Amino acid sequence: MADNLPTEFDVIIIGTALPESILAAACLRSGQRVLHVDSRSYYGGNWTSFSFSGLLSWLKEYQQNNDIGEESTVAWQDLIHETEEAITLRKKDETIQPTEAFCYASQVVEEGIEEIGALQKNPSSGVSSTFTEVLDSACLPEESQSSHFNSDEIPAKHTQKSAREVSLEVTDVEESVEKEKYCGDKTCIHTVSDKDGVKDESISTVEDNANQTNRNRITWAGCVKEGRRFNIDLVSKLLYSQGSLIDLLIKSDVSRYLEFKNVTRILAFQEGKVEQVPCFVLKTKADVFNSKELTMVEKRILMKFLTFCLEYEQHPDEYQAFRQCSFSEYLKTKKLTPNLQHFVLHSTAMTSESSCTAVDGLNATTNFLQCLGQFGNTPFLFPLYGQGEMPQCFCRMCAVFGGIYCLRHKVQCFVVDKESGRCKAIIDHFGQRINAKYFIVEDSYLSEETCLNVQYKQISRAVLITDKSILKTDSDQQTSILIVPPAEPGACAVRVTELCSSTMTYMKDTYLVHLMCSSSKTAREDLESVVEKLFTPYADTEINKEELTKPRLLWILYFNMRDSSGISRSSYNGLPSNVYVCSGPDCGLGNEHAVK
């Protein structure tokens, strides 16, 4: 039980987001005694993935401004000695502000509809019973997270493997979700690929008709009933197939708990239309020159530029004069056509015109090219069941080797020795004093007084449920990424990630789409124009009976998330020397920031 915790540890970690989870596993493997606590009722913090009903329950907590897992607490002041002082921690998470949700699907619900296989949430979580009339009529269960684990559920068997031996296993998606794959003495990063083959034309016609019929049947009640099929990420990211996080997954053996799917399409938005990027998903010089989308002159210019990017550090005279210029200005000096400039900027470097220097753009392009061919013809991977799987897998590694985990466990304060200035202990909401040598805390737990001088950035996020892909093809198993350029100079580009059903993140006959950019206003103000360009509200198409050229929007959630990356330690007031702060998710595409 939580009130019977040991009182001595080497490291206490507060928060179970990805950086803290990585550190917990690393500390445990190096022989430290680790206590890992979180005031939330789920793993992952802002890196988590929710089922549909779990997401709605999470929304209620924020919209009603309730404390997470609110419980009665024991006074801690009497536990502080004369030679000590206390640094209080924040009582509620304020990293998500504000939230706006809109439902366009049919809200006619049947009596008694509830999520299949749902588990009731612990009543101590303090979630209110009201969200909207639609939620109440759908009998939505209050479930907080689709997949949790504790130390009793961790397999006791742990086979050590060589850190450098990597095997790529391509599996059928149905097989991959039934059982965990092991590769003998090799470390495996499992990926799921679509099967090749040509469908019979008559079969394709029948399937298209069936899909059209199913699209007309999508309702709010259906989304609620199949809610456990959703795994909705709070932060939208992909993994570059080469980098520090991939190396860490392999070396730590955490990769055996995970499976991945290739991102199969890189899209571009140009002249109001979505199109697949030519050449950039192709690996060889022959592929580039066989492409029919570019002229022969463009192919030669492109090939010369891509070759230069791979070796640009060896030719500093080619870019030194442009260090202070933006990447878009630098591309113009390389004689790239406007068409090629657009594709390189938004579909290779994956950046916007105003926010990327020439050197940063060259680094991003080089990284993109080096990742091609590692685990498929695109440089990106996506974890099955969502980003929330990764922090849980590192926590699982820590628990396997003896780490102690407590969710819904609040920490009231740090106990600091006045003479040395070092933190000696924490006091939890049960009034128990727990001592440790080192402390690691997520930024969101620090009090307003501690963060008084910190200047935070913000991320604008949107989560959409739609009825078809933004670019329809013969295959419905396409995981896509799209960068929508800013409509106004100086604004940020919007990153769009569309997931297919084989990522195990949504129900059949729907698509899950994530939008993300750096905030300049509220999430709705930043992202609504992009939503209107790419999607049509479900209700409008039913009323007007217009021809469906865009995906229909069934449900959308807007919210702003704090970006605490890049903050120096000196920005925090009165932080003890043995207390280390981990930041939340940043706005970047990859996860390299979390590993740093």
Image (tube, grey):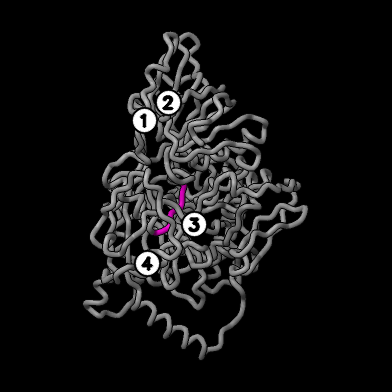
Amino acid tagged 3: Val
In this figure, which residue is indicated by the disc labeled 3?
A: 344
Q: Say which of marks 4 and 2 sits in front.
A: 2
**With respect to residue 500, does 449 lie above or below?**
above
In this figure, which residue is indicated by the disc labeled 1?
A: 73
Residue 482 shows in the view:
no
Separation of residues labelled 2 and 3 (CA atoms): 57 Å
Using the image, tell me which numbered label, if any, was put on residue 431. 2
Badge 2 vs badge 3, beta-carbon distance below 8 Å: no
Amino acid tagged 2: Gly
In this figure, which residue is indicated by the disc labeled 4?
A: 223
Is label 1 in a helix, a strand or a loop? loop
**Residue 553: horizontal and vertical position, in percent?**
32, 67
Q: Say which of marks 3 and 4 sits in front.
A: 4
Q: In which quadrant of the rendered view does residue 585 lie? A: top left
Numbered range of the magenta stretch:
47-52
Task: Sort mark 1 into few (<14), some (14-19) or many (20+) by Cα contacts within 10 Å.
Answer: few
Q: Earlier in the sequence, mark 1 or mark 3?
A: 1
Q: Is residue 252 left or right of 148 when viewed as pictured? A: right
Is label 3 in a helix, a strand or a loop? helix
